[in-house]
C-alpha cells in the first residue's frame, strides 16, 4: 500500500482492503490475449507504485457510500489513465528507468511503448463507459488536459508569457487534472452532495501542483535505490522544472550573482556525461532555488488543505489533510 499515512487505524484497514480489490482489477484490466500486448501492458503494473490516485478515489468515497462497486471501477480508471501517461511521458522524456525497472521503451522500443500507452487508455475508456455518460465526459475532459499539459510543456512558454506561470499551468493540466478527477470520482460515485464534489476537485487541483513541485525537489535529491530514478534526469533531458526556471530568472535579473549566472549556463550545457550531470545536480541542490521550490510546494499543499474547510470534521478529513502534507514531506 502507499506510504501516505491514514491516521485512523480502522479507516486505514478499510482502505487497504479496497485497494487490494483495485489491484486485482488492474491486473485483470491490462491482461491481453496478445502475448506482446500482455507483457508490455503488465510492465508498469507489475513494477508497483504508490497508487496515490486510486487511494484518493477510495478515501474521498468515504465521505459518502464508499462501498459502492462503482467506486472500485472509478479507482481503476484513474490508475489505468495514469499508467498510460507514464508510457508516453517516458518516451518523450527519454527516461531510462521507471519505478526501479527499465522503462517500457528501453525494453521494447518507442513505438511499442507509445502503442501500449494507447492500449491502456483504451482499457480505461472501456471501464469508464460502464460508469455512465457523465463519467465518460469527465474522463475525456481530463484526457484533453493531460494532452494539453504535455503539449505546452513540449513547446514552452510564449515570448510574452512568464515561464514560471506557464509551468504552473502545465502542472495543473498534467498532474492536477487527474488527481482532481480521482477525488471527484470517489465523491461522485459514493453519492456525495455536489458541493462536496466541488470541494474535492479544488483540493485535487492544488494538491497536484504541490505534488509535482515536490517531485522537482526529489529529482535533485533522490536516492536512486528508493525512487528508481537517476537524480537530474529532467535536467539532462531539458524537461522544465521549478528550480531550473527560478535559477534562470535569477541569472537574468539585475543583481544576479556570478554563482547564479555560472550555474544557469551549466544547466544549458551538454549534460550527457554522468560526472558533469552529477556536479551540476550537486551545485543546484545547494542553491536557494531548491528551498524556494520546496516552499512553493508547501504553499500549494496548505492551499489544498484550506480548501477542505467546508468538509465535516472526522477521520476522512484528517486523512485528506495528512495526504496533502505527506506528498510534500517527501521533498523534505
Image (cartoon, rainbow, N blue to C red):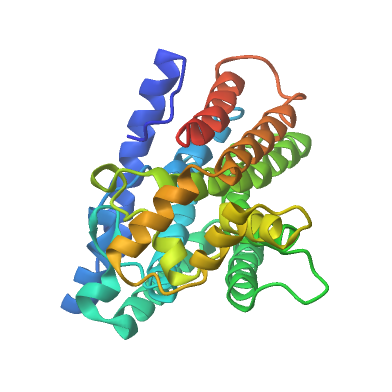
Considering every residue shown, the one lying at the far right of the view is: 160
Q: Nearer the viewer, residue 262 or 290?
A: 262
Considering every residue shown, the one lying at the far left of the view is: 35
Looking at the image, residue 235 sits to the left or right of residue 298; the answer is: left
Vertical arrangement, residue 204 with respect to residue 106, above or below:
above
- Residue 107: image x %, image y %? 20, 74
- Residue 251: image x %, image y %? 67, 59
Q: Nearer the viewer, residue 95 or 41?
A: 95
- Residue 220: image x %, image y %? 43, 49
Task: Please report the residue visible at 47 percent of the width from the left and 37 percent of the height from the top.
Answer: 331
Residue 189 appears in the rendering: no
The number of numbered discs placed on residues in the rendered structure image is: 0
The quarter of the picture where the N terminus appears is top left
Q: Nearer the viewer, residue 283 or 48?
A: 283
Vertical arrangement, residue 284 with respect to residue 234, above or below:
above
Residue 157's quadrant in the figure? bottom right
- Residue 225: image x %, image y %? 23, 45
Task: Please report the residue visible at 77 percent of the width from the left and 24 percent of the height from the top.
Answer: 310
Residue 162 appears in the rendering: yes
Amino acid at each position: 500500500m502507499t506510504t501516505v499515512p491514514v491516521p485512523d487505524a480502522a479507516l486505514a484497514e478499510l482502505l487497504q482492503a479496497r485497494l487490494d480489490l483495485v489491484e486485482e482489477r488492474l491486473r485483470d484490466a491490462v491482461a491481453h490475449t496478445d502475448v506482446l500486448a500482455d507483457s508490455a501492458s503488465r510492465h508498469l503494473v507489475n513494477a508497483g507504485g504508490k497508487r496515490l490516485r486510486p487511494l484518493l478515489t477510495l478515501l474521498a468515497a468515504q465521505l459518502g457510500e464508499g462501498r459502492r462497486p462503482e467506486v472500485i471501477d472509478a479507482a481503476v480508471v484513474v490508475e489505468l489513465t495514469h499508467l498510460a501517461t507514464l508510457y508516453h511521458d517516458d518516451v518523450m522524456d527519454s527516461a531510462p528507468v521507471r519505478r526501479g525497472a527499465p522503462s517500457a521503451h528501453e525494453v521494447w522500443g518507442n513505438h511499442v511503448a507509445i502503442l501500449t500507452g494507447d492500449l491502456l487508455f483504451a482499457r480505461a475508456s472501456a471501464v469508464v463507459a460502464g460508469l455512465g455518460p457523465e463519467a465518460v465526459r469527465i474522463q475525456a475532459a481530463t484526457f484533453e488536459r493531460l494532452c494539453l499539459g504535455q503539449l505546452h510543456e513540449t513547446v514552452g512558454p510564449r515570448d510574452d508569457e512568464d515561464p514560471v506561470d506557464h509551468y504552473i499551468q502545465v502542472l495543473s493540466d498534467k498532474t492536477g487534472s487527474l488527481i482532481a478527477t480521482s477525488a471527484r470520482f470517489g465523491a461522485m460515485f459514493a453519492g456525495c452532495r455536489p458541493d462536496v464534489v466541488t470541494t474535492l476537485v479544488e483540493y485535487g487541483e492544488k494538491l497536484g501542483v504541490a505534488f509535482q513541485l515536490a517531485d522537482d525537489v526529489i529529482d535533485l535529491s533522490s536516492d536512486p535505490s528508493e525512487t528508481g530514478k537517476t537524480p537530474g534526469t529532467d535536467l539532462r533531458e531539458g524537461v522544465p522544472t521549478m528550480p531550473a526556471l527560478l535559477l534562470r530568472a535569477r541569472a537574468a535579473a539585475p543583481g544576479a550573482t556570478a554563482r547564479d549566472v555560472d550555474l544557469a549556463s551549466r544547466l544549458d550545457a551538454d549534460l550527457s556525461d554522468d560526472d558533469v550531470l552529477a556536479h551540476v545536480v550537486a551545485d543546484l541542490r545547494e542553491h536557494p532555488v531548491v528551498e524556494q521550490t520546496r516552499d512553493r510546494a508547501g504553499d500549494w499543499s496548505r492551499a489544498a488543505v484550506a480548501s477542505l474547510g467546508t468538509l465535516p470534521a472526522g477521520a476522512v478529513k484528517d486523512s485528506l489533510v495528512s495526504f496533502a502534507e505527506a506528498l510534500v514531506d517527501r521533498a523534505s
